[in-house]
Image: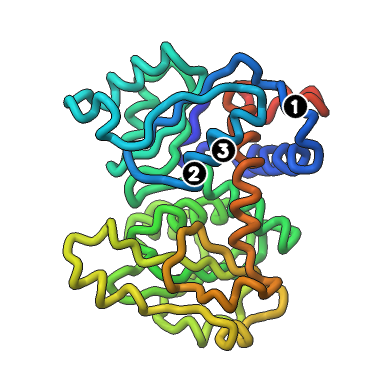
Amino acid sequence: MRHLIDPLDFSPEEIDSLLNLADRIRSDPAAYQDVAAHKKLATLFYEPSTRTRLSFESAMLRLGGKTLGFAGAQLSSASKGETVADTARVVSNYADVIAMRHPKEGAPLRASMYARVPIINAGDGGHAHPSQTMIDLMTIRQRKGRLDHLTIGFCGDLKFGRTVHSLTAALSQFEGNKFVFISPEELRIPQYVKDETLTPLHQTYKETTDLEAELPALDVLYMTRIQQERFFNEEDYLRLKGCYSLNAKLLELAPPDMPVLHPLPRIDEIKLDVDNDPRAAYFDQVHNGVYIRMAIILALLGIPDPLTGKTVLDH
Protein backbone atom coordinates (compact mmCIF):
# COMPACT_ATOMS: atom_id res chain seq x y z
CA MET A 1 0.00 0.00 0.00
CA ARG A 2 1.30 3.45 -0.95
CA HIS A 3 0.50 6.88 0.48
CA LEU A 4 1.11 10.42 -0.80
CA ILE A 5 2.35 12.37 2.23
CA ASP A 6 5.31 14.17 0.69
CA PRO A 7 6.11 14.89 -2.98
CA LEU A 8 9.26 12.78 -2.63
CA ASP A 9 7.05 9.72 -2.00
CA PHE A 10 6.92 9.46 -5.80
CA SER A 11 10.10 9.04 -7.86
CA PRO A 12 10.70 11.26 -10.92
CA GLU A 13 9.68 8.31 -13.11
CA GLU A 14 6.45 7.82 -11.13
CA ILE A 15 5.72 11.55 -11.32
CA ASP A 16 6.19 11.41 -15.08
CA SER A 17 3.80 8.45 -15.32
CA LEU A 18 1.27 10.25 -13.09
CA LEU A 19 1.38 13.39 -15.23
CA ASN A 20 0.99 11.31 -18.39
CA LEU A 21 -2.09 9.65 -16.89
CA ALA A 22 -3.54 13.06 -15.96
CA ASP A 23 -2.95 14.23 -19.54
CA ARG A 24 -4.81 11.19 -20.89
CA ILE A 25 -7.71 11.78 -18.50
CA ARG A 26 -7.89 15.41 -19.58
CA SER A 27 -7.94 14.38 -23.25
CA ASP A 28 -10.58 11.65 -22.84
CA PRO A 29 -12.45 11.97 -19.53
CA ALA A 30 -15.29 9.72 -20.69
CA ALA A 31 -12.91 6.75 -20.77
CA TYR A 32 -12.42 7.06 -17.00
CA GLN A 33 -15.95 7.84 -15.83
CA ASP A 34 -16.64 4.45 -14.23
CA VAL A 35 -13.19 3.07 -13.37
CA ALA A 36 -13.60 3.71 -9.62
CA ALA A 37 -17.24 2.62 -9.40
CA HIS A 38 -18.20 1.45 -5.88
CA LYS A 39 -15.02 3.02 -4.41
CA LYS A 40 -15.28 5.69 -1.71
CA LEU A 41 -13.09 8.72 -0.93
CA ALA A 42 -13.19 10.23 2.57
CA THR A 43 -12.27 13.92 2.76
CA LEU A 44 -11.14 14.71 6.31
CA PHE A 45 -10.58 18.47 6.30
CA TYR A 46 -9.68 19.93 9.68
CA GLU A 47 -8.91 23.29 7.99
CA PRO A 48 -10.98 25.45 5.61
CA SER A 49 -10.66 24.67 1.92
CA THR A 50 -12.49 25.48 -1.29
CA ARG A 51 -10.42 24.30 -4.27
CA THR A 52 -8.70 21.29 -2.72
CA ARG A 53 -11.72 19.68 -1.07
CA LEU A 54 -14.11 20.27 -3.95
CA SER A 55 -11.45 19.21 -6.45
CA PHE A 56 -10.89 15.89 -4.66
CA GLU A 57 -14.62 15.28 -4.40
CA SER A 58 -15.17 16.18 -8.05
CA ALA A 59 -12.29 13.88 -9.04
CA MET A 60 -13.82 10.87 -7.27
CA LEU A 61 -17.29 11.54 -8.64
CA ARG A 62 -15.89 11.80 -12.18
CA LEU A 63 -14.27 8.39 -11.70
CA GLY A 64 -17.65 6.91 -10.80
CA GLY A 65 -16.95 6.71 -7.07
CA LYS A 66 -18.57 8.32 -4.04
CA THR A 67 -17.39 10.73 -1.35
CA LEU A 68 -17.97 11.24 2.36
CA GLY A 69 -16.29 13.33 5.03
CA PHE A 70 -16.30 16.61 6.90
CA ALA A 71 -15.16 20.18 6.29
CA GLY A 72 -14.02 21.47 9.67
CA ALA A 73 -12.63 19.97 12.85
CA GLN A 74 -15.68 21.22 14.76
CA LEU A 75 -17.83 18.89 12.65
CA SER A 76 -15.83 15.80 13.62
CA SER A 77 -15.04 13.83 16.77
CA ALA A 78 -11.82 15.86 16.98
CA SER A 79 -14.00 18.38 18.84
CA LYS A 80 -14.45 15.64 21.47
CA GLY A 81 -10.74 14.94 21.66
CA GLU A 82 -10.41 12.03 19.23
CA THR A 83 -6.85 11.59 17.94
CA VAL A 84 -5.82 11.57 14.29
CA ALA A 85 -4.64 7.97 14.74
CA ASP A 86 -8.05 6.83 15.98
CA THR A 87 -9.85 8.76 13.26
CA ALA A 88 -7.68 7.07 10.63
CA ARG A 89 -8.44 3.65 12.10
CA VAL A 90 -12.18 4.35 12.16
CA VAL A 91 -12.53 5.93 8.72
CA SER A 92 -10.55 3.06 7.16
CA ASN A 93 -13.71 1.02 7.72
CA TYR A 94 -15.79 3.40 5.64
CA ALA A 95 -13.59 4.44 2.71
CA ASP A 96 -11.08 3.06 0.20
CA VAL A 97 -8.84 6.15 0.22
CA ILE A 98 -8.58 9.21 2.50
CA ALA A 99 -7.63 12.81 1.68
CA MET A 100 -6.67 14.71 4.86
CA ARG A 101 -5.98 18.38 5.50
CA HIS A 102 -4.79 19.33 8.97
CA PRO A 103 -3.30 22.46 10.59
CA LYS A 104 -0.61 20.41 12.38
CA GLU A 105 2.47 19.38 10.44
CA GLY A 106 2.86 15.63 10.34
CA ALA A 107 -0.79 14.76 11.02
CA PRO A 108 -1.36 12.96 7.68
CA LEU A 109 1.91 11.05 8.20
CA ARG A 110 0.68 9.89 11.60
CA ALA A 111 -2.67 8.92 10.07
CA SER A 112 -0.86 6.82 7.46
CA MET A 113 0.77 4.78 10.24
CA TYR A 114 -2.64 3.58 11.46
CA ALA A 115 -4.88 3.64 8.38
CA ARG A 116 -5.63 0.49 6.43
CA VAL A 117 -6.24 2.50 3.23
CA PRO A 118 -4.07 5.00 1.31
CA ILE A 119 -3.72 8.50 2.80
CA ILE A 120 -3.34 11.61 0.64
CA ASN A 121 -1.89 14.65 2.38
CA ALA A 122 -4.14 17.53 1.29
CA GLY A 123 -2.00 20.03 3.20
CA ASP A 124 -0.50 19.85 6.71
CA GLY A 125 0.25 23.19 8.33
CA GLY A 126 3.22 24.90 6.70
CA HIS A 127 4.83 21.59 5.74
CA ALA A 128 3.66 20.06 2.45
CA HIS A 129 0.85 19.94 -0.12
CA PRO A 130 1.87 17.18 -2.54
CA SER A 131 -1.29 17.01 -4.65
CA GLN A 132 -0.95 20.76 -5.34
CA THR A 133 2.67 20.08 -6.27
CA MET A 134 1.57 17.56 -8.90
CA ILE A 135 -0.83 20.18 -10.28
CA ASP A 136 2.00 22.71 -10.42
CA LEU A 137 4.29 20.22 -12.19
CA MET A 138 1.58 19.39 -14.72
CA THR A 139 1.00 23.08 -15.44
CA ILE A 140 4.73 23.86 -15.76
CA ARG A 141 5.23 20.92 -18.12
CA GLN A 142 2.28 22.05 -20.25
CA ARG A 143 3.68 25.58 -20.50
CA LYS A 144 7.42 24.84 -20.78
CA GLY A 145 7.48 21.33 -22.21
CA ARG A 146 9.87 20.08 -19.52
CA LEU A 147 10.58 19.96 -15.79
CA ASP A 148 14.37 20.25 -15.95
CA HIS A 149 16.88 23.04 -16.66
CA LEU A 150 14.48 25.76 -15.51
CA THR A 151 15.01 28.88 -13.40
CA ILE A 152 12.05 29.06 -11.03
CA GLY A 153 11.25 32.12 -8.97
CA PHE A 154 9.20 31.76 -5.79
CA CYS A 155 7.81 35.02 -4.42
CA GLY A 156 5.93 35.94 -1.25
CA ASP A 157 5.47 33.86 1.90
CA LEU A 158 8.20 31.26 1.58
CA LYS A 159 8.38 30.53 5.31
CA PHE A 160 4.85 29.19 5.78
CA GLY A 161 4.09 28.40 2.14
CA ARG A 162 3.68 24.61 2.06
CA THR A 163 3.15 24.68 -1.71
CA VAL A 164 6.57 26.32 -2.08
CA HIS A 165 8.28 23.73 0.12
CA SER A 166 6.63 20.85 -1.76
CA LEU A 167 7.32 22.18 -5.25
CA THR A 168 10.94 22.96 -4.38
CA ALA A 169 11.41 19.37 -3.19
CA ALA A 170 9.80 17.93 -6.31
CA LEU A 171 11.68 20.11 -8.79
CA SER A 172 14.95 19.33 -7.01
CA GLN A 173 14.65 15.79 -8.33
CA PHE A 174 14.99 17.02 -11.92
CA GLU A 175 18.34 17.94 -13.43
CA GLY A 176 19.64 21.45 -13.88
CA ASN A 177 16.94 23.48 -12.12
CA LYS A 178 17.82 26.75 -10.39
CA PHE A 179 15.78 28.40 -7.65
CA VAL A 180 15.32 32.09 -6.85
CA PHE A 181 13.61 32.72 -3.51
CA ILE A 182 12.10 36.23 -3.34
CA SER A 183 10.66 37.27 0.01
CA PRO A 184 10.89 39.69 2.94
CA GLU A 185 13.57 38.75 5.45
CA GLU A 186 10.92 37.59 7.91
CA LEU A 187 9.40 35.11 5.43
CA ARG A 188 12.50 33.50 3.93
CA ILE A 189 12.59 29.87 2.88
CA PRO A 190 13.01 27.71 6.04
CA GLN A 191 16.42 26.36 6.92
CA TYR A 192 15.10 22.80 6.92
CA VAL A 193 14.24 23.09 3.20
CA LYS A 194 17.84 24.06 2.53
CA ASP A 195 19.28 21.39 4.82
CA GLU A 196 17.00 18.53 3.72
CA THR A 197 16.46 19.32 0.04
CA LEU A 198 18.62 21.99 -1.55
CA THR A 199 22.03 21.29 0.01
CA PRO A 200 22.01 17.45 -0.15
CA LEU A 201 20.91 17.55 -3.80
CA HIS A 202 23.49 20.25 -4.65
CA GLN A 203 20.85 22.64 -5.95
CA THR A 204 21.71 26.13 -7.16
CA TYR A 205 19.67 28.78 -5.40
CA LYS A 206 19.72 32.41 -4.30
CA GLU A 207 17.71 34.46 -1.83
CA THR A 208 16.70 38.05 -2.50
CA THR A 209 14.04 40.64 -1.70
CA ASP A 210 13.92 42.19 -5.21
CA LEU A 211 11.26 40.73 -7.53
CA GLU A 212 11.73 43.39 -10.21
CA ALA A 213 15.44 42.64 -10.63
CA GLU A 214 14.88 38.89 -10.99
CA LEU A 215 11.95 38.84 -13.42
CA PRO A 216 13.93 39.04 -16.70
CA ALA A 217 15.87 35.84 -15.95
CA LEU A 218 13.00 33.61 -14.80
CA ASP A 219 11.49 30.70 -16.74
CA VAL A 220 8.65 30.30 -14.22
CA LEU A 221 7.27 32.63 -11.52
CA TYR A 222 5.38 31.13 -8.57
CA MET A 223 3.55 33.80 -6.56
CA THR A 224 2.10 33.17 -3.09
CA ARG A 225 -0.07 35.16 -0.73
CA ILE A 226 0.99 36.33 2.70
CA GLN A 227 -1.02 33.93 4.88
CA GLN A 228 -2.81 35.73 7.69
CA GLU A 229 -3.77 32.44 9.36
CA ARG A 230 -0.09 31.53 9.91
CA PHE A 231 0.77 34.71 11.84
CA PHE A 232 0.68 34.92 15.62
CA ASN A 233 -0.12 38.63 15.66
CA GLU A 234 -2.00 40.85 13.24
CA GLU A 235 0.57 43.65 13.36
CA ASP A 236 3.21 41.55 11.60
CA TYR A 237 0.71 40.42 8.98
CA LEU A 238 -0.46 43.96 8.19
CA ARG A 239 3.15 45.12 7.87
CA LEU A 240 4.05 42.40 5.37
CA LYS A 241 0.86 41.62 3.45
CA GLY A 242 1.37 44.08 0.61
CA CYS A 243 5.11 43.63 0.15
CA TYR A 244 4.81 42.15 -3.38
CA SER A 245 2.24 42.95 -6.03
CA LEU A 246 2.55 41.73 -9.61
CA ASN A 247 0.75 43.92 -12.12
CA ALA A 248 0.70 44.20 -15.90
CA LYS A 249 3.34 46.94 -15.91
CA LEU A 250 5.79 44.90 -13.83
CA LEU A 251 5.11 41.81 -15.93
CA GLU A 252 6.50 43.66 -18.97
CA LEU A 253 9.97 42.94 -17.54
CA ALA A 254 9.43 39.17 -17.71
CA PRO A 255 10.13 36.85 -20.66
CA PRO A 256 7.17 36.43 -23.05
CA ASP A 257 6.88 32.71 -22.28
CA MET A 258 7.24 32.88 -18.47
CA PRO A 259 4.11 31.37 -16.87
CA VAL A 260 2.82 32.93 -13.66
CA LEU A 261 1.56 30.31 -11.19
CA HIS A 262 -0.28 30.77 -7.90
CA PRO A 263 -1.88 28.10 -5.67
CA LEU A 264 -4.80 30.46 -4.89
CA PRO A 265 -6.57 32.06 -3.18
CA ARG A 266 -4.93 35.35 -4.01
CA ILE A 267 -5.41 38.61 -2.16
CA ASP A 268 -3.51 41.50 -3.76
CA GLU A 269 -0.21 39.86 -4.77
CA ILE A 270 -1.43 39.44 -8.37
CA LYS A 271 -3.49 42.31 -9.72
CA LEU A 272 -6.57 41.70 -11.85
CA ASP A 273 -4.90 43.27 -14.89
CA VAL A 274 -2.61 40.22 -15.09
CA ASP A 275 -5.52 37.80 -15.58
CA ASN A 276 -5.85 38.42 -19.32
CA ASP A 277 -2.13 38.08 -19.99
CA PRO A 278 -1.41 34.76 -21.76
CA ARG A 279 1.31 34.09 -19.16
CA ALA A 280 -1.29 33.88 -16.36
CA ALA A 281 -1.42 30.14 -15.59
CA TYR A 282 -3.16 30.07 -12.20
CA PHE A 283 -6.61 29.24 -13.54
CA ASP A 284 -5.01 26.52 -15.68
CA GLN A 285 -3.76 25.08 -12.38
CA VAL A 286 -7.34 24.94 -11.06
CA HIS A 287 -8.48 23.20 -14.26
CA ASN A 288 -5.63 20.69 -14.01
CA GLY A 289 -6.43 20.02 -10.35
CA VAL A 290 -9.34 17.70 -11.00
CA TYR A 291 -7.41 15.62 -13.56
CA ILE A 292 -4.27 15.23 -11.45
CA ARG A 293 -6.34 14.23 -8.42
CA MET A 294 -8.22 11.69 -10.52
CA ALA A 295 -4.81 10.30 -11.50
CA ILE A 296 -3.60 10.25 -7.86
CA ILE A 297 -6.70 8.34 -6.73
CA LEU A 298 -6.30 5.76 -9.50
CA ALA A 299 -2.59 5.42 -8.76
CA LEU A 300 -3.00 4.85 -5.01
CA LEU A 301 -5.91 2.44 -5.48
CA GLY A 302 -3.86 0.46 -8.00
CA ILE A 303 -6.58 0.75 -10.67
CA PRO A 304 -5.17 0.17 -14.18
CA ASP A 305 -5.51 2.87 -16.80
CA PRO A 306 -8.31 1.63 -19.10
CA LEU A 307 -6.44 3.02 -22.12
CA THR A 308 -3.05 1.40 -21.42
CA GLY A 309 -3.86 -1.41 -18.99
CA LYS A 310 -1.02 -0.26 -16.75
CA THR A 311 -0.85 1.12 -13.20
CA VAL A 312 1.23 4.16 -12.22
CA LEU A 313 2.78 2.80 -9.02
CA ASP A 314 4.36 -0.41 -7.86
CA HIS A 315 2.38 -1.56 -4.82
Q: Residue at x 55, y 41 (%)?
A: 55
| Nearer to the camera, 116 or 284 | 284
**Which of the marked residues, 2 or 1, is nearer the chain's N terminus?**
2
For discs 3 and 1, the disc positioned in front in the rendered view: 1
* Vertical side of 3 occupied by 246: above or below: below
| Nearer to the camera, 245 or 302 | 245
**Which of the marked residues, 3 or 2, is nearer the chain's N terminus?**
3
| Nearer to the camera, 75 or 306 | 75
* Vertical side of 276 occupied by 95: above or below: above
Amino acid found under the numbered disc labelled 3 = Phe
Residue 214 coordinates in the image, percent (x, y): 53, 82
Q: Secondary structure at mark 1?
A: loop
Residue 146's quadrant in the figure? bottom right
Q: CA distance from mark 3 to mark 2?
A: 20 Å
| Nearer to the camera, 10 or 35 | 35
Q: CA distance from mark 3 to mark 1?
A: 18 Å
Q: Which residue is mark 1?
A: 305
Q: Residue at x 67, y 75 (%)?
A: 277
Binning the other alpha carbons within 10 Å of mark 3 as few (below 14), some (14 to 19) or many (20 upward) gives: some
Residue 103's quadrant in the figure? top left
Q: Which residue is mark 2?
A: 52
Q: Which residue is mark 3?
A: 10
**Which of the marked residues, 3 or 1, is nearer the chain's N terminus?**
3
Residue 216 coordinates in the image, percent (x, y): 61, 84
Q: Secondary structure at mark 3?
A: loop
